[in-house]
Amino acid sequence: MPKFIKEYKENLILLLAHFSADLCQGSVSAALTVMLEQGVLHNKQEMSYLVLASTLVSSLIQPVVGYLSDRKPRPYLMSLGIIVAALGLMFIGLITDFSLLFILLTTSGIGVAIFHPQAGKIANSVSTTHKGRGMSIFSVGGNLGFTAGPCLISGATLLWGLPGIMVIAIPAFIMSSWLLYRNSKYVEYTRKEEKRQILNSSIEKEDYKGFAILTTMIFFRSMVLFGLTTFIPTYFMDMFHMNSQSANLN
């Protein structure tokens, strides 16, 4: 086994977990683009409402999940989050009622919110003395998930139509089962990190100003990201007469 893989085995597992969660989130806009082309959605305003459904509630719930994660190690929330995210998304290709679509995508967003706080905490815990490198590996998984989402949805809907969106469940169920199997291991890592933090509590200080700046940066980054991934494909469809799959890949 290569030295890097052996040394960062736990980080790489969490990379795959992050990939599975953000694969769901990154697939939303691509799926909605196909649904717009197929006539299930009638305009871009409906698309924007559904993207809002998948992101707004997620943003509001994440601090609550983070609070629960801090009170007691709950690694199983990673598995639960991935499953809920996939369940909320996988059935939208079978639905035409807008209200139900809104509920399903809200559910998917809740799943994403459940996953990230606990996963980030464990990624920090397993990184031991290499926090920066460990967290960067974890972040790569999310970026890859966002990138792969449109590719997966485009290929699946090209082969099987809108029901093809259900393929999102395959990586989600595999990864959530793996994480659940390793739950006790992650509890152990979390408790070790908590003991380390208690020993260093007199040295480490809360930096609320830095946190506020970082939060603001993430807010604007996310606003631009979701705006671009949602409406650039529709721009290509309108201006260059591409089909939805080609527009998503571009």
Image: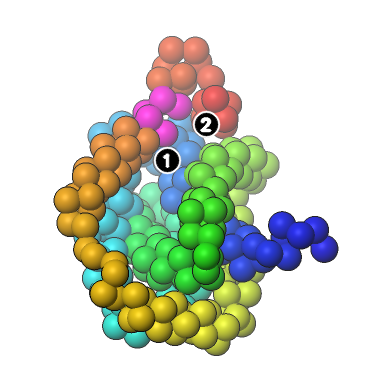
| Residue 33 image-quadrant placement | top left
Q: Which residues are magenta?
A: 227-234
* Nearer to me, 4 or 58: 4
129 vs 53: above or below: below
Q: CA distance from mark 1 to mark 2?
A: 9 Å
Instruction: Inspect the image, locate mark 2, and give the three-letter code of the amino acid beneath it.
Output: Asn
As drawn, the label of residue 107 is: none
Single out the residue that lies furthest toward the top. 239
In the image, 212 versus 157, the foreground residue is 212
Residue topped by disc 1: 29
32 relative to 93, above or below: above
Residue type pointed to by label 1: Ser
- Report the predominant secondary structure element of the magenta stretch: helix
Counting from the top left corner in percent of width and height, residue 52 is at 27, 46
Mark 1 touching mark 2, by CB under 8 A?
yes
Residue 48 on the magenta segment: no
Residue 151 quadrant: top right
Question: Which residue does the image show at 30% across and 51% down from the upper left?
Answer: 55
Name the residue beneath numbered marker 2: 248
